[in-house]
Amino acid sequence: MEPNVRFWITERQSFIQRFLQWTELLDPTNLVVSIEKIEKSRQLLLTHEDASGSDLEDKRVQEAWKRSLSTVHPDSSKLIPGPFRPAALLPFTAPMVFLSMLPVKSLKSMILPQVSFYTYSTVFNIVNGNASYDRRPHESILVGAGVIASSTFFGLFPRLLQVRFSLNSIFSRSVIPVIILAQLSGMNVVASRSLEPLRGIEVMDKEGSVIGYSRKAGTKAVKDTATSRVVLFGTSAFIPEVFSYFFKRTQFFLQCPWSLWTLKLSCTILVMGLMVPVSFSVFPQIGRIQCSELEKEIQSATEETELFYNRGV
């Protein structure tokens, strides 16, 4: 069985345990760990199949789990490219979220932040989604290009209206952009991973044996991940806006107006630093689904009452 899958199946963790686990996996050093060290860690886990994530006596095992879970895809057993590993989400998207929420001076000033954010989000979702179904490279490229174009358009459209009709109320400047960002982040997951509900993803028993491919499991995996993205980016955009609203009414802001952007950027990074592990921990990495909820052909292929699937990140 793939070590990462074995870990998430055997380690029945609570939300708090998953949160603490993700704080370790999101360590920035996981972005630059060498391929040689990853391969050694994987070899250690493959030769010690009884090694568990709670084995505190062997520091080598702990470090091996950390490297494997943070750098290797559980479906394909391939290395995840450095810029799209889970630990890269915060440093790449926090500045983009900050720039996307700045007041609009001209539509041109908003195009680059929007394109950058949705391009990165789309590629991140495709790379870290479920990879157990048959997917050709050109299909991912076509789907990704379409999702990037549509997400960018819908992200820019309310800004275009704001510039065109000079809408300066707090609702149009702060509330609507937060809602749009949160909803589009969720829809970006749904669209970029749209092949999973269509073709079905692998469902397996507790031993890791594949029982079949389920479209219902694919739908649940995409839905749960999309929900976590809405929570992540919605909260990360909303809280800095609230802080900014009250900060503008202080005497310090009147004396140092430039300090608003420093506060807002710092607040965005801090909030996202907390919300990234929270959003990753809301749902288990390897999801569980009752066999009775799946297709009849899968129900007839096993006597298990509960099956497992990779939700993706």
Image: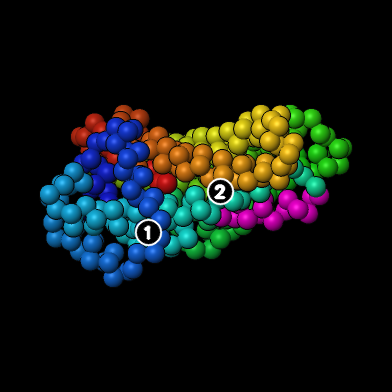
Along the polypeptide, which appears first: circle 1 or circle 2?
Answer: 1
Query: Is residue 185 something that shows in the picture?
Result: no
The percent coordinates of residue 212 (x first, y second) are 31, 45
Residue visible at 69% across and 30% down? 250
Looking at the image, which residue sits at the far right? 165
Nearer-the-camera pick, 271 or 7:
271
Residue visible at 28% across and 53% down? 66
Looking at the image, which residue sits at the far bottom? 36
Residue visible at 23% across and 57% down? 64
Decide: few, some or many residues near mark 1? Use Cα within 10 Å; few <14, some 14-19, many ≥20.
few
| Real-space CA distance between mark 1 and mark 2, rounded to the nearest whole angstrom | 18 Å
- Left or right: where does residue 156 sit relative to residue 233? right
The residue where tag 1 is placed is: 29
Residue 215 part of the magenta-drawn span? no
Kindly identify the amino acid type of the residue bearing the numbered disc 2: Ala
Nearer-the-camera pick, 158 or 196:
158
The residue where tag 2 is placed is: 94
The percent coordinates of residue 84 (x first, y second) are 46, 57
**Start and end of the magenta stretch?**
106-120
The percent coordinates of residue 90 (x first, y second) are 49, 49
